[in-house]
Amino acid sequence: MRALREWLLRLWATVGPRRRDDDLEEELRLHLDLVAEDARRRGDDPDEAVRLARIEAGSRAQAMDAMRDQRGLPWLEDMARDLSYALRTLRRNPGFTATAMLSLALGIGANTGIFSLVDQVLLRRLPVSEPDRLVLLNWRGPSAAVVQSGDGHLMSYPLCRDLQEQGRFFDGAFCRHPWPVNFSAGQQYEVVPAELVSGSYFHVLGIRPALGRFINPSDDVDVGNHPVVVISYDYWKNRLGGAEDAIGRKVLVNRTPMTVIGVAPAGFGGMDVAEPATVWIPAVMAREATIEFSPVLNRRAFWMHGFARLKPGVTAEEATAGLQPWFKAMLDADTRREDFPRVTPEQQRAFLASTLEALPGDQGWSRLRASIVRPLWALMAGTILLLLLACLNVASLLLARGAERRQELTTRMAIGASRGRITRQLIVEALFIALAGGLAGLAVAPLVSRALLYFMPQGTGLAPVVDLRIFLFALGASLVAGALCGLAPAFQAGRRPLAASITGRATPAGADVRFRKAIVGAQLALTLVLLAGAGLFIQTLASLYTRERGFDSGRLVMFRADPAGTGSPASDAPRVMRDLLLALQGVPGIERVSLANNGLFGSLGASRVLTIDSDRRIVTERPVPMLRIGADYFSTLGVRLIAGREFDERDTFDVDRTGFRSVIVNESFVRRYFGGLNPVGRRIGFGNRPDTPLNIEIVGVVGDFRRRFLRDDAEPEHMFVPFARSGAVAGDGTFFVRVRGEPEAAFASIRAAVAEVDPTLPLIGLRTAEDQVLQALRSEVMLATLSAGFGGVALLLSAVGLFGVMSFVVTQRTQEIGMRMALGATRSGAIWLIVRDALTTIAAAAAVGLAIAMTVGLVAPAWLSTALYGVSSSDARTFAATTTMLAVVALTACVIPAGRAAALSPMVAIREQQESMWRAARLNVRRAMRELTAVSERVVAPGTLTAAVAAAIHRADSFPDAVELALATLRDRVGARFILLLERAGGEYRCRECAIPADGLLINRLRRYPHPLLLTAGDFEAWGRWADELQPTCAVEIAQLARTGARMAVPLWSKQELVGVLLLGAPEGREAFTAPEKELLSGAADVFALLIENAGLNERALQQEKLRRDLALAAEVQRRLLPAQPPRCETATFAAFTLPARTVGGDYYDFLELPGERLAIAVADIAGKGIPAALLMSALQASLRVLATEQDLSSSALAAKMNGFLNDSTAGNSYATFFYAQLDFRSRRLRYVNAGHNPPYLVRRVGAAVEIAELTIGGTVLGLFPHMQYEDGHVDLCPGDLLVAFTDGVTEARNDAGEEFGEERLKELLREVNGSPAETISSVLSDRVRQWIGVAEQHDDVTFVIAAVR
Amino acid sequence: MSNAPPKKADVLQGTLDLMVLQTLDSLGPLHGYAIAGRFEQVSSGALRLNMGTLYPALMRLEQRGLIRATWGTTDTNRKARYYALTAAGRRQLAREKQAWDQMAGIIHTLLHGKA
């Protein structure tokens, strides 16, 4: 109780008013003051006492923290803070936020929308008591049915009655039959779904009526004698206005008066969730309810679904097993019944082997469910992939932003946010996006559901609802999505080292790019899987649509008419139908008209067992579906007539009391029962008794046509009988109209013709046969359309993702691209560079995606092949096409970034990069400042000094600016005459005005006692006296401090380090600061300390970054300027080698082919480092290349010209040593000039000895002085001579011990290897130098050029 | 018992509340420092409370409605926050005291045999 009160108060303190921080602080201050007071009373030094108190009583800051934690609920505060922070960040980036939310809204919306239907169709259980205990009873085996109505899980009504007696396993059983009835409760007729139910139905389901009573067993006794109905809650509410007196009302069911006895509870729609019933009618009223179906008590009529309720504790398996003895006995007894059909012994055995099984019945029975379960799951899988893709998209966006936000995050870490805290922050942000996206997704969901419902049959009870379950699903999906999205950036933030990321650029962003590429790759792979699925479904649809149907759907229009439905007398129906036919036949533009009792691709209607007079008297093995058709039916539909004739007027409307006289059968029928022989003229009879009269003549045979499913491999046997028959109560029928011209154009004239016969007669489902075909293919159309839609969205998402990453890559590689273009790369080369980069990602993704698609295709062929038609689940063509499509779209997405790369002008690229680096730095500073402010706002109560200082920083553009502003603000707020910030620099703390030693008096004092220190003129005086006497070394410092006139010194601490000191001048109009002012300043000191530390870090990182960039650029320049490989010729072999030091030197060598069979060899060593050296080197190369090709320019003249050129370019600030030689292959003369370069060696064997000459003739280095003269040297080369030019990096290479490689060692080595080809010498030489350097640091480039004369 | 100086005693978990309540009951309204001083006094200096322990505990008791705080002034004219027992606090104290005595009795018997 007390704890609850505490918790509530803390909660209240978290969200509402609470004790302010300064209130808490005041209490602690009192505590410390009293400690000090006590100490004074005891005679201790008060400052010392306070220090001791602090040690003893704990730090005030820590106590403050503990109190703050106790005051509110810290975790809630943190959470609220994270959330409000996330909100602010998201509001600042509306583009990002919108994109991310939209992606997730699409993903979550699609999932939720489809789940809503999955839930309604596949997951939800019947709203009855204990649905778990309901079982659906299924007859397995041949049923010996003579009449069959409907499909799946059927049994006869008498069997159902038998089952009710099975009390050992069941608490009751019932059966039901769904059927649409013409229903009228006073106004007009309408067709409503009804359930014909056994009397036990409601009792076994265990539900209560909303009004009145339910049908009970006593209403289900005598056939035709219980005209009562129960109506649905919705019908009662909507049509009867929820009238209390609805009970007892008379209603008409197919024109039979019945009485309403009860109203079903709200939400109950019978056993088929997809087709909820409006009316419940006792099964014994079947004849009245279904018009033509009468054999209710016939054991051979299979038309009902049987359900039972298991006894508590009995499982379905136990019931199945336990029922068999009774079932077998029942079967046995049945065969002895008089009406049992005559069957062969095998048929009888098969019949006796039938079993009755109890299947789970908690979801009732639904035809729709059976047909839609797979498409729905397939779509669900597709949308889950889509959501995953959306998550990847958002993760990728977050990563991209993470790169931008690194500075911010680092600052937060620097001021004490833990890594976990940052991670949580990022996840909260992602979760927030996901939840917002999920909310938007809830709005999208009904649209998706609606789109799905559009492809489903009309009149299902399914609706695009969003209820609690759906809401919870969306919530769950959002949370999962949010966690998925947030993980990547959180991971990224978690592993980034602090200092490295302060500039946001200091570490190469390669890891980032790789991470993002991996994400985009995953997106592309998923997209490919979705696209491949869509491709397969589209292929399936196309195959089914173009499949031979056996009839001609072009120019064919159909509609249904139901004269009895409008309330006209049932006996009138045949006349109305006939009038309609005649009226339509008279319409111009109509070629032919016919009718049938069923349309295309719908129910097959009733089936009958036949006795056939083939070569002998045989009985059909299964009931044959029967269609009643009018005259000219086949010619109207365009079905092939194989033998005999169609029905004509004689057959159809000639009422004959003995029943049908003529029948037409299809090809399958003939194949099966006549062995393919022409059956025209043979006779058949309905039923299978020995005495069944064979009084119906086969008058024609027609080709098979698809009546039911376009998918069926072979059409089953069908028979067709004349539409009208004796004693027909009423007849609804489907009219088929073959028109001339556009079928849609005929609609109006058809309507007019019908209106002429009966203006009130509605044309139900007037549409073209083409439409009907599409209706029949709706689940395929649905799969194809929606999967293509998902694929499209996926493609879009990943294209956007790829675009983002490639743009990022281009930005990152701007420098490199500019470099390459500066060095001669073409535009197409630049494009290729980016495209190649993208291609690797795309190729890898395609490979993974294909592998997944193939695996799915191969692992689940059974599952898939039922959903597919005319295409294999691992169809190579489909996969190839979708891969191509993906590749094309993906490459298109790279075109813009690649184009941008190509449009770069080289100099702009390089300059812009530098520029953007500084811009980025400026932005980083701003962001850091903002962050600092934001953080301090949270820590510091508003209105305090610290807050003011922090707010001032906010305006800053750079760290020095920030410091400046902060100082000014502080000075104004405390009213000090001046303020000085002494920063640590080497052994001092200094500012412009003064400097004090780091080991001096003041600093030591502040170190010992880390709080602001009040100073007075008297203090300085006393210190001065003390110093004069005891510590003369301090006198200077004290004098200096006294000169400044400071009245307070504030130490700036950051992480146990004194980073600076603030010196404040006396307050305006007063001589000294007060103790509270002192306290105030210790808070502000923290902000300063942080600022100084960050400034230092930022500065250092920026400098490092600049250096790194310079070096990278220089290295690239150099790499490009050196020749790729040495020249080849007959006179000599050449080799060159260069080993760059880590910091760039400026070694250069070149081979140039000159006119007149000459070759120029150049080696240069440029002084300086970084960009300047690299640029000088490129200038040197350019001038050399221009000058060298000038004919008749001697080496010395060349050197002189180059000296002038370099001197002009560098204004004498830099120079290069240079060796240049021209080798004439014909004369073997080497002319050279040595401009201050290490003398190259000419190694020549003279007899047994090896002599080494140095080529020294020339002049001084290039570039230092204008107008220098150079001298030419020359040597005539002999075979076996070896020329080695090198830079000082070779001879000055130092080993670990600091020892130089030296000229002697080099000469020794050259003596050894003399005589080998240049290539060999080069490799020996480079190995030796490398070995020499070993683990030591290499200070300079090592370069040499070798020519070995043959 | 050894002659070693009393060691800094740790506050037994859960006893701090009882100690605060009892102190306020016997001495009337006190500020935080005085409460800490009283603890130190009765423990002969063995029990010195960290501010970070004492003040959050006072806040918790206040939130639970067992004590009430008001700002007043000390004899030296300093602003101070005085804590006083509420009726609920008095009842709580009585309950806890009884429970403590009972527990102490059990422990004592356990440690030293028949009392």
Image (spheres, rainbow, N blue to C red):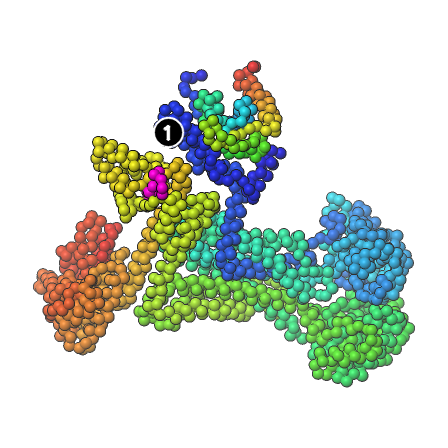
Left or right of A117? Residue B2 is: left
Q: Is residue A967 visible?
A: yes
Q: Position of residue A550 (x, y in %)?
A: 70, 76
Quadrant showing the C terminus of chain A: bottom left
Identify residue for label 1. A46
Left or right of A999? Residue B59 is: right
Q: Position of residue A972 (x, y in %)?
A: 38, 47
Q: Position of residue A1068 (x, y in %)?
A: 36, 43
Depth check, front residue: A1131 or A1224: A1224
Q: Position of residue A772 (x, y in %)?
A: 71, 72
Mark 1, Cα crowd under 10 Å, few <14 / some 14-19 / many 20+, is some
Q: What residue span does the magenta drawing correspond to?
A: A1060-1072
Depth check, front residue: A419 or A1036: A1036
Q: Is residue A1349 visible?
A: no
Left or right of A270? Residue A811 is: left
Depth check, front residue: A127 or A362: A127
Quadrant showing the N terminus of chain A: top right
Depth check, front residue: A266 or A574: A266
Q: Going 10% across and 63% down the picture, which residue do you hit?
A: A1253
Q: Quadrant location of residue A626?
A: bottom right
For residue A386, above or below residue A662: above
Report in which chain the residue with disc 1 lies: A
Residue type pointed to by label 1: Pro
Q: Going 38% across and 31% down the picture, which residue do you hit?
A: A51
For residue A284, above or below residue A31: below
